[in-house]
Image: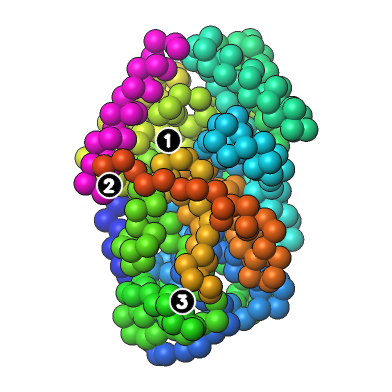
């Protein structure tokens, strides 16, 4: 099954991915059909919106979420399902750009997203096939030196639950000859991303929150004393507005449009491989990603399929044939899967910031936003949701640090940002290929 992402307002169903096919039962929520007022309104029922909303209803706030399609319809329900600690930009890069204090601050929260996910799963009994551990793999000696430097850097910040793996040690986790080694992060993990989103939505509603599906924001007035969001069939006036549309917010809020660029990534899912073959491929049932600029990432599903992702398309468009794009990469890593049937192939967008650092801020006094996780949204969105809830509740200490981090538009503006980014990706891909 191959799906092209024709994401438009009011889409009626999840993209036909493996995740949608194996999703836990979830009610279809009706759209907003009148004018209402609410204490806090959140736009977007992905991880950022759900994390923010759940933290706020736990504090006793009255919160509503509007979603253009379905809960977890975007990247939150389509991603690789990997709990990877850190931001896209390294701690060393953050230190060079923004100073030691900011780097120390970021180092203190790079593992927080995974901790929040585990707490949510435990507290609310969310069934999402949560497993521990992830591995970063190296193709070249240069990659290994990069991983060694990263491990030492993180250890210097007190993060010491990672260890280097040589080629033979790595083979105990991944049955392939393509890598020279890697790093295992015992605090990483993986899960069924759509079921996590659906479980968080159910917890949010159980505590009194309201979700309106099929309710795209048509316009947003952030200049009013109380922000107003207009939808197709009603408007919502709120004391506080939180924008969490990320790559799917579109041009509804022009102030945010130049800050990020949608980028699509693709995933294929094999047929069920059976317990024996699955255990041979990834004996420790861990998730894996390599450290190339355009990387591969993969893991086993609960029913023993290999979920294999990778590729980037700047601008958020989809390849004409996802299977043809990813299958050669999968066979390169696991030649023993040649001839295996591919049951699903899908695509989804994440929001890329030029600095590769996620952004958090305000428009006026009463409108908050968070976006630009740059491929690290599973953990980053959960952390940012908590920080947004703290700021709305009166503690702006952590929010203020991120709000002050400068952002930069993509060179060339909207017209040339895609070719600029493509040229950059070619350069970095060449460096990976020649091992520098």
Helix, strand or loop at label 3? It is strand
Secondary structure predominantly adopted by residues drawn in magenta: helix
State the residue in front, 66 or 89.
Answer: 89
**With respect to residue 296, does 258 lie above or below?**
below
Residue 77 visible in the snapshot:
no
Q: Mark 2 points at which residue?
A: 413
- Would you call the spot at circle 2 few (<14 residues within 10 Å), some (14-19), or many (20 or more)? few
**With respect to residue 343, does 9 lie above or below?**
below
Helix, strand or loop at label 2? It is helix
Residue 35 is left or right of residue 394, and the answer is left
**With respect to residue 194, does 327 lie above or below?**
above
Circles 3 and 1: CB atoms closer than 8 Å: no
Residue 188 is left or right of residue 313, and the answer is right
411 in magenta: no
Q: Mark 3 points at which residue?
A: 212
Q: Give the range drawn in magenta.
A: 413-436
Q: Position of residue 227 (x, y in %)?
A: 46, 79
Q: Name the residue under label 1.
A: 309
Residue at (39% x, 59% y) in the render: 256
Q: Distance between the residues labelled 1 and 2?
A: 29 Å
Considering the image in quadrants, where does the N terminus appear?
Answer: top left
Considering the image in quadrants, where does the C terminus appear?
Answer: top left
Residue at (31% x, 80% y) in the render: 232
Q: Earlier in the sequence, mark 3 or mark 2?
A: 3
Helix, strand or loop at label 1? It is strand
């Amino acid at each position: 099954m191959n799906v092209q992402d024709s994401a438009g307002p009011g889409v009626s169903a999840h993209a036909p991915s493996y995740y949608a096919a194996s999703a836990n039962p979830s009610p279809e929520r009706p759209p907003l059909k009148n004018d209402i007022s609410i204490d806090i309104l959140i736009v977007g029922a992905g991880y950022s919106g759900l994390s923010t909303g759940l933290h706020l209803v736990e504090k006793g706030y009255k919160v509503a979420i509007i979603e253009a399609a379905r809960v977890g319809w975007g990247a939150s329900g389509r991603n690789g399902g990997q709990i990877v600690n850190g931001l896209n930009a390294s701690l060393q890069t953050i230190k060079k750009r923004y100073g030691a204090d900011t780097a120390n601050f970021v180092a203190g929260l790079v593992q927080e997203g995974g901790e929040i996910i585990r707490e949510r799963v435990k507290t609310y009994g969310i069934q999402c096939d949560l497993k521990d551990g992830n591995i970063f793999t190296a193709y070249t000696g240069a990659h290994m030196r990069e991983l060694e430097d990263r491990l030492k850097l993180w250890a210097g910040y007190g993060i010491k639950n990672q260890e280097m793996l040589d080629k033979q040690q790595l083979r105990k986790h991944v049955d392939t000859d393509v890598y020279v080694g890697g790093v295992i992060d015992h605090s990483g993990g993986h899960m069924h991303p759509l079921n996590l989103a659906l479980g968080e939505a159910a917890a949010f509603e159980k505590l009194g929150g309201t979700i309106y599906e099929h309710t795209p924001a048509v316009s947003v007035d952030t200049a009013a004393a109380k922000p107003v969001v207009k939808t197709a069939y009603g408007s919502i006036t709120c004391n506080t507005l939180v924008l969490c549309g990320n790559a799917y917010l579109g041009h509804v809020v022009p102030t945010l449009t130049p800050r990020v660029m949608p980028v699509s990534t693709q995933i294929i899912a094999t047929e069920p491989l059976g317990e024996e073959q699955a255990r041979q491929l990834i004996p420790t049932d861990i998730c894996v990603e390599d450290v190339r600029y355009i990387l591969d990432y993969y893991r086993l599903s609960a029913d023993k399929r290999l979920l294999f992702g990778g590729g980037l398309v700047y601008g958020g468009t989809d390849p004409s044939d996802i299977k043809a794009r990813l299958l050669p990469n999968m066979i390169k890593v696991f030649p023993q899967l040649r001839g295996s049937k591919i049951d699903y192939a899908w695509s989804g967008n994440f929001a890329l910031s030029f600095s590769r650092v996620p952004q958090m801020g305000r428009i006026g006094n009463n409108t908050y936003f968070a976006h630009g996780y740059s491929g690290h949204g599973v953990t980053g969105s959960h952390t940012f949701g908590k920080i947004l809830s703290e700021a709305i509740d009166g503690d702006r200490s952590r929010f203020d640090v991120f709000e002050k981090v400068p952002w930069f538009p993509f060179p060339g503006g909207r017209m040339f940002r895609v070719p600029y980014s493509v040229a950059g990706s070619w350069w970095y891909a060449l460096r990976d290929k020649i091992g520098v």
